[in-house]
Image: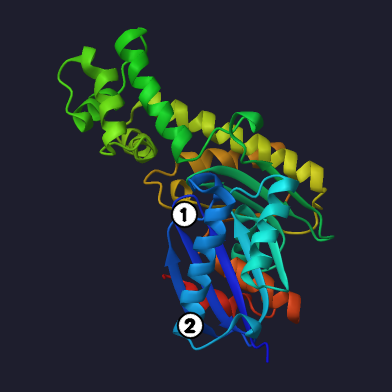
């Protein structure tokens, strides 16, 4: 008997799998490393191997077989094109799933953060993506493919902006910023002419992560650093313009509450409110009169995958509070 659902959030840094029964009761919640095929040396072949191991681990632990999974939703980082969706779908079928949905992981924030199950999710974590779903079921993704989609957000891009801003102060007469002594101290640099060599050496030996530098932006803004604040405002403007485009493209109605969900570590864990406050201000300025509810996601995105899977089997909207209540704080 198929009495269970699986919700997977597969990221570029970490992944979560939630196993629930079809009454919305949590059975298990598992952790794994990156499952974005673009972050795996073996691409789709390695995805098949590791995803299969992850699923088998959770099912075996609970004495279940894959035939007992009634529905599964796979939110996958790296599912940005039609070909990628097809390839990932083939991987999932090989593992043994019959009834499932593959979607970009950005979509999971909508059912996880919006009681209505519609709205927009803005991701600022490892990557930078916007996903939208309206009341008619129309879906749209903006961003998530790097320079092609003019992404300005995500830990990698934000970290690279920190590094390049420091380089500009050192060698291009850039405006002084507290980011410079902070980064030089982190790298153990006392002579600016060692800057490039040190970064290369530490990148090669794995002791330095550009991605981790994104946190320095928020710390610098707390110190009233104007350069760091300008960077965050530019990032906010990029997100706000994407959200405004999403509202227009999906034709959200002014009379309905519009849910905008912020997810990803740089939104959820950012130590200073400047980034989110600026996004709100710009979106509200572009769309006056909308009843907009802004939410920082307080549950793992895998909760959205579970809710989505349960909705495919039963009454929509029935499981939101129940599932989120069981996954809050995990």
Q: Is residue 272 left or right of residue 251?
A: left
- Residue marked by disc 1: 34
Q: Nearer the viewer, mark 1 or mark 2?
A: 2
Q: Quadrant of residue 22?
A: bottom right
The residue drawn where x is 40% and y is 51% is 269
Q: Position of residue 262 (x, y in %)?
A: 55, 52
Q: Nearer the viewer, residue 45 or 2?
A: 45
Label located before the other in sequence (1 or 2): 1
Q: Quadrant of residue 197?
A: top left
Q: Position of residue 55 (x, y in %)?
A: 53, 72
Q: Are the residues flagged by discs 1 and 2 in contact, CB closer than 8 Å?
A: no
- Residue marked by disc 2: 60
What's the CA distance linking mark 1 and mark 2? 21 Å
Q: Residues within 10 Å of mark 1 (few under 14, many from 20)?
A: many
Classify 174 as above or below 302.
Answer: above
Q: Residues within 10 Å of mark 2 (few under 14, many from 20)?
A: few
The residue drawn where x is 65% and y is 30% is 148
Q: Could you say whether the residue bearing mark 2 is in a helix, strand or loop?
A: helix
């Amino acid at each position: 008997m198929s009495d269970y659902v699986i919700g997977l959030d597969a990221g570029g840094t970490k992944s979560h799998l939630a196993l629930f029964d079809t009454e919305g009761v949590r059975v298990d919640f598992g952790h794994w490393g990156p499952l974005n095929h673009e972050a795996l040396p073996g691409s789709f072949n390695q995805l098949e191997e590791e995803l299969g191991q992850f699923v088998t681990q959770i099912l075996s632990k609970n004495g279940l077989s894959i035939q007992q999974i009634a529905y599964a939703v796979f939110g996958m980082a790296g599912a940005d094109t039609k070909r990628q969706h097809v390839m990932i779908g083939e991987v999932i079928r090989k593992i043994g799933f019959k009834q499932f949905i593959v979607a970009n992981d950005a979509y999971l924030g909508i059912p996880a953060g919006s009681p209505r199950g519609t709205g927009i999710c803005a991701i600022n974590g490892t990557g930078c993506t916007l996903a939208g779903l309206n009341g008619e079921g129309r879906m749209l993704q903006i961003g998530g493919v790097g320079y092609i989609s003019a992404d300005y957000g995500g830990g990698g891009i934000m970290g690279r902006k920190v590094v390049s801003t420091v380089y500009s102060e050192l060698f291009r007469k850039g405006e002084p910023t507290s980011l410079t002594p902070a980064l030089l101290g982190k790298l153990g640099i006392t002579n600016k002419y060692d800057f490039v060599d040190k970064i290369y050496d530490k990148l090669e030996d794995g002791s330095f992560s550009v991605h981790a530098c994104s946190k320095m932006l928020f710390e610098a803004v707390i110190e009233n650093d104007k350069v760091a604040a300008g960077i965050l405002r530019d990032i906010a403007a990029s997100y706000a313009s994407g959200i405004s485009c999403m509202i227009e493209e999906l034709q959200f109605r002014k009379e309905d509450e519009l849910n905008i969900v912020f997810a990803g570590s740089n939104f959820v864990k950012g130590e200073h409110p400047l980034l989110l406050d600026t996004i709100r201000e710009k979106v509200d300025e572009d769309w006056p009169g909308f009843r907009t509810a802004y939410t920082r996601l307080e549950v793992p995105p895998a909760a959205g995958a579970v809710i989505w899977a349960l909705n495919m089997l039963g009454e929509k909207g029935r499981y939101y509070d129940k599932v989120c209540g069981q996954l809050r704080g995990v």
